[in-house]
Amino acid sequence: MPAISYNDIDPGKKAFIFELDDVLYPAKDYYYQIYYLFANLLEYTEFNSAARTTELMIDTYIKKGAGKVYSELVSQLSIEEKYRDKLEIMLLTSRLPLKLLLFKNMLSFMQEVVTDRKRLFIVTNGSPQQQLNKLRQIEWHGLEPYLTCYFADESLPKPEPDVIHLLMKEHNLDRRDLLMISGSETDRLCAETCGIDYINTGEII
């Protein structure tokens, strides 16, 4: 099935709402770089092999998710609990070695939205501090002035509709003006609750 392009979208739409992780860029690109930095910290302080630690962290992320990574380090490499806080701080604040890159098709789509003088919003769940750290390290190719970001956890996380209602009020937008682009059941339910149209990011990427 061919990807959806901007030209396929209802021209009546005035604004587009995106999630961040695995919608605009691959979330793993953020986590893997943090794991590399953390593994090198452990190599320096505990003389663990950075390569082995990084490999275990990435493998655990793939198979079990980010929430299980540190417990696996404790189990497999006997890493002390005292370093857990350091990893959590790094996940919130670290400067990455490399910029995070947008999905190519998503970048093109967003550029066309801006060229058509329409609005771009990012409405993201998760820790506002961590999500902001990610946003600051994405290579936006000049899109920054056209982006408005809302951190849903500052009100109520999606699928609760509060953050979308706030967005509509602050920018004088109606439900029919909006299109949400995301890849999760959470966001699909949020869009349904708000009565706005929804497209799965996989149809664009």
Image (tube, grey):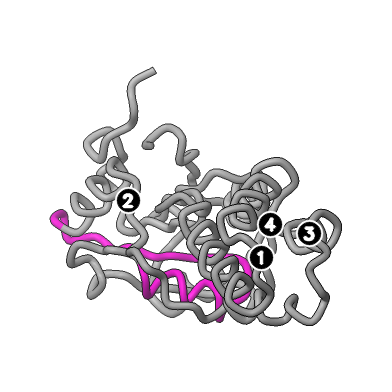
Start-end of magenta stretch: 115-137
| Residue appearing at x 62%, y 53% in the figure | 52
- In magenta stretch: residue 174: no
Whichever of callouts 1 and 3 sits on the residue coming sooner in the sequence is 1
The quadrant in which the N terminus is found is top left
Mark-to-mark CA distance, 1 and 4:
21 Å
Please, what is the three-letter code of the amino acid marked with disc 2? Lys
Asked which secondary structure carries label 1, the reply is loop
First in residue order: circle 1 vs circle 2: 2
Q: Residue furthest right?
A: 75
Against 196, residue 128 (above or below) is: below
In the image: residue 156, left or right of residue 163? right
Q: CA distance from mark 1 to mark 3?
A: 8 Å
**145 to the left or right of 63:** left
Check whether the beta carbons of the residues at disc 1 and disc 3 lie within 8 A of each other: yes
Residue indicated by mark 2: 13
Foreground residue among 11 and 113: 113
- Which residue is depicted at the point 66% across and 65% down? 48
Spatial CA distance of label 3 from label 4 is 17 Å
* Of pointers 2 and 3, the one earlier in the residue sequence: 2
Residue 94, position in %: x, y? 49, 78
For the question of whether residue 101 can be seen, the reply is: yes
Residue 203: name its quadrant: top left
In the rendered image, residue 189, in percent from the top left (x then y), is placed at 66, 48
Count neighbours of disc 2 (C-alpha within 10 A) and say few if under 14, some if 14 to 19, many if 20 or more: some
The label number, if any, that marks residue 77 in the structure image: 3
What amino acid is found at the position of numbered circle 1 in the picture? Asn
The reply to whether discs 1 and 2 touch (Cβ–Cβ < 8 Å) is: no
Give the mark toward the camera: 2 or 3.
3
- Residue corresponding to mark 1: 48
| Of the image marks 2 and 4, the number of the one nearer the N terminus | 2
